[in-house]
């Protein structure tokens, strides 16, 4: 309690209400995804097998581009709240539809599997864009770590739900939990928006003059080299994450063939990932960034992941695949998330919302599509050990990633407001 009193000492009443609200949103969004993701993945594997992952990721690109277009087109017209409301309705409708009809029409899981990764990114993007607009750089180091930590705790709770109730409730019924959780999320989000430094009308006026088209969002990258660097860093993380995701699920499909047992195992792994993430988040938000500085914090991520790839090459077994998967997901959901979000703080409002939407939604899925094309090409070569080549290709990515980080902080140190 004394820690919380000290933490909130520098904030007024309105700011405290805002912080508590957005932390709650992050908690429940993370919890819902940790329930839905294991169930969705398990049903998908039973219906299509892990070999269909690359095809699914490629087809996800046009869907993500469509959502980015719709988002950038209507956000300036509708504002944050109405856009978020429509998005919540879509989440509830699609997950309920899948839960009720996947038994009769199993192929519906293909579309739900794609959509779950779209809506989680949009939900977080909407929340973080509001946070970036309200919280200043000085307070971000400690606050972001707390927010990610609470989000990690929410994911632990959600993972425990799927980890201990999947066999009893059945995997598809877990999708029904999206409805009550997202109704609560919307109510809290609405309250947070009232206490933020911007409302819907102000938001519309502050955006760059124009019609809010998708082209305007993409045009921002021509004006800002910093955005290009952020895009590259995100793409490198997501390509390597997709490769290790495939590696892990290939082993999982072989070693645990039962659907509900697979959901149970994945749910417990999810809880483990998010327990580790929570520790990373609380440390990464203040201690690690404070002592390492933002530049070294960005460099340490590809270095750590490169070491893991070398370990898998030495010991290519299921337990090592699980370790590599847990490692990259833990870092992606925590430490990397914090230092990535901090790069957006000094950017303009338009860059924080529309350019961020392109990076967080479209670029994420496009990166997975790149990884998918690589995996599909390898699947057609019978003599190639795909799972070992995944680690080799990952090592190349980590090297390029490190070079981009060095270049970004060398050329744009003042623009991203770094104080090492």
Image: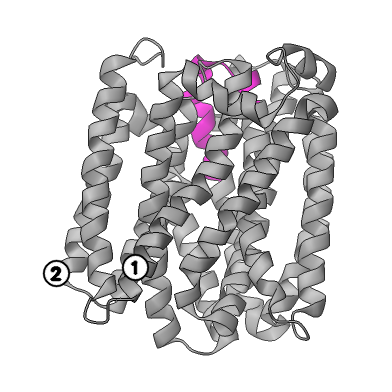
Where on the picture, by quarter, is residue 358? top right
Mark 2: few/some/many CA within 10 Å (<14, 14-19, 20+) = few
Mark number, residue 259: none
Q: Is residue 6 visible?
A: no
Does 99 sit left or right of 66 as displayed? Answer: right
Where 147 falls versus 153 (above or below)?
above
Residue 306 located within the stretch drawn in magenta = no
For marks 1 and 2, give the CA distance.
24 Å
Foreground residue, 53 or 252?
A: 53
Locate residue 313, reporting x and y percent: 17, 67
Q: Which residue lies most toward the left here? A: 314
Q: Which residue is mark 1?
A: 377
Foreground residue, 14 or 127?
A: 127
Residue 143 located within the stretch drawn in magenta = yes
Where 287 falls versus 393 (above or below)?
above
Q: Which residue lies most toward the top here? A: 414
Q: Which residue is mark 2?
A: 314
Does 258 sit left or right of 417 as displayed? Answer: right
Which is more foreground, mark 1 or mark 2? 1
The secondary structure type at the circle numbered 2 is helix
The magenta stretch is 131-150
The secondary structure type at the circle numbered 1 is helix
Foreground residue, 270 or 286?
A: 270
Please give the name of the residue rendered at 46% of the width and 40% of the height, measured from the top-left corner.
337
Where 69 falls versus 325 (above or below)?
above
Identify the image quadrant of the N terminus.
top right
Locate residue 383, reporting x and y percent: 21, 81
Please give the name of the residue rendered at 45% of the width and 82% of the height, measured from the top-left corner.
253
Q: Which residue lies most toward the bottom here? A: 258
Please give the name of the residue rendered at 78% of the width and 12% of the height, measured from the top-left corner.
205
């Amino acid at each position: 309690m004394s820690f919380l009193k000290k933490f909130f000492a520098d904030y007024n009443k309105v700011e405290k209400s805002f912080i508590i609200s957005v932390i709650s949103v992050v908690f429940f969004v993370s919890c819902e995804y940790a329930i839905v993701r294991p169930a969705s993945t398990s049903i998908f594997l039973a219906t299509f097998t892990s070999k269909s992952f690359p095809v699914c990721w490629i087809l996800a690109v046009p869907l993500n581009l469509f959502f980015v277009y719709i988002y950038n087109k209507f956000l300036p017209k509708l504002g944050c709240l109405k856009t978020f409301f429509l998005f919540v309705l879509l989440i509830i409708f699609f997950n309920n539809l899948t839960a009720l009809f996947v038994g009769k029409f199993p192929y519906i899981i293909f579309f739900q599997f794609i959509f779950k990764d779209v809506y989680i990114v949009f939900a977080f993007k909407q929340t973080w864009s509001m946070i970036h607009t309200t919280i200043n750089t000085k307070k971000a180091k400690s606050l972001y770590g707390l927010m990610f930590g609470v989000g990690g705790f929410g994911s632990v709770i959600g993972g425990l739900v799927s980890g201990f109730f999947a066999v009893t409730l059945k995997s598809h019924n877990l999708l029904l939990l999206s409805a009550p959780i997202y109704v609560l999320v919307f109510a809290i989000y609405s309250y947070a928006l009232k206490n933020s430094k911007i409302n819907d009308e102000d938001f519309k006026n502050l955006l760059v003059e124009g019609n809010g088209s998708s082209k305007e969002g993409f045009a921002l990258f021509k004006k800002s080299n910093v955005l290009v660097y952020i895009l590259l860093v995100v793409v490198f993380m997501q390509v390597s994450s997709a490769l290790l995701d495939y590696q892990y699920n290939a082993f999982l499909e072989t070693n645990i063939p039962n659907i509900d047992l697979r959901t149970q195992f994945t749910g417990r792994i999810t809880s483990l990932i998010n327990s580790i993430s929570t520790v990373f988040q609380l440390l990464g938000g203040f201690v690690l960034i404070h002592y390492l500085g933002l530049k070294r914090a960005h460099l340490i991520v590809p270095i750590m992941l490169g070491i893991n790839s070398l370990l898998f090459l030495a010991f290519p077994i299921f337990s090592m695949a699980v370790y590599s998967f847990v490692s990259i997901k833990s870092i992606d959901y925590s430490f990397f998330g914090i230092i990535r979000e901090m790069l957006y703080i000094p950017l303009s409002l338009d860059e924080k919302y529309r350019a961020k939407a392109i990076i967080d939604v479209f670029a994420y899925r496009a990166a997975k599509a790149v990884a998918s094309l690589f995996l599909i090409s390898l699947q057609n070569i019978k003599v190639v050990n795909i799972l070992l080549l995944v680690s080799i290709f990952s090592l190349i990515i980590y090297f390029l990633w490190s070079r981009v980080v060095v270049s970004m902080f060398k050329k744009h140190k003042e623009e991203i407001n770094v104080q090492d």
